[in-house]
Amino acid sequence: MRKLAGLWVIGILLVGYTAHAQTVQDFNLVNVLTGNSVSLSTYPSCSGVVIIFTTNACPYDEYYRARITKLSHDYHEKVPVLLVNSNPDPTDSNDAMVKKAQQAGITIPYLADKDQTLMNALGATKSPSVYLLKNDGGKFTIVYKGAIDDNAQVEADVRHAYLKEAIDQLLAGQAIPTGEVRPVGCSIRKK
């Protein structure tokens, strides 16, 4: 934290970040739960899409499991949530992803990105890290990226639900003033 022009600036929060400018190219990844391919074009009539990078072994993913499920349930018709696993470790193989989903009760699309194409395109480095994409006539752009909220370990102590606030602002047609908040979690290993 540093003082700048009479204001305290916290290094992890970038207010007004221009994430809005990054267009996301369509992708085609396999949902390990169904074997079906999923892409952004799968959701032509939605207002947006949430992509959450996750792994099987990171404790931060477990802290957020119930919150992700609730977000998915609350917004599934207008802003579907997609889980993406890009970790190349054997503990995150497609078979291990299916087992994890069964154990954790994951029913939303769980996509394998083992060549790390989507991870590299979006610049994801942490698990969990989120990307809220706005759908503008089939053109998807990032309007928020980073943390789900400000307290991974204690949901009851969350003061800022960054992702939920950004989704609500997107659905209300409002500008999203906080475009990026640094995610907290485990590093995703590069191939």
Image: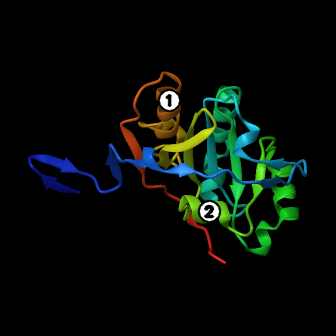
Residue reaching furthest top?
Answer: 172
Q: Amino acid at mark 1?
A: Leu
Mark linked to residue 119? 2
Question: For mark 2, does the 10 Å Cα neighbourhood hold few (<14), some (14 to 19), or many (20 or more) residues?
Answer: many
Quarter of the image with the N terminus in it? bottom left
Which residue is at a point 57% across and 65% down the rendered structure image?
Answer: 186
Residue reaching furthest bottom?
Answer: 191
Q: Amino acid at mark 2?
A: Met
What colour-coding does the image apply?
Answer: rainbow
Please say whether residue 131 is visible from this viewpoint.
yes
- Horizontal and vertical percent position of residue 10: 27, 52
Quarter of the image with the C terminus in it? bottom right
Classify mark 1: helix, strand or loop.
Answer: helix
Q: Cβ–Cβ below 8 Å for labels 1 and 2?
A: no
Residue 126's place in the image compared with 134, above or below, is: below
Q: Earlier in the sequence, mark 1 or mark 2?
A: 2
Task: Left or right? Give the position of 153 relative to 53.
Answer: left
Toward the viewer: 78 or 65?
78
Which residue is at a point 73% across and 72% down the rendered structure image?
Answer: 88
**The quarter of the displayed image where residue 187 is located:** bottom right
**The quarter of the displayed image where residue 85 is located:** bottom right
Q: CA distance from mark 1 to mark 2?
A: 23 Å
Residue reaching furthest left?
Answer: 6
Classify mark 2: helix, strand or loop.
Answer: helix
Mark linked to residue 45? none
Which residue is at a point 87% across and 57% down the rendered structure image?
Answer: 99
According to the image, label 1 marks what residue?
Answer: 170
- Horizontal and vertical percent position of residue 130: 56, 49
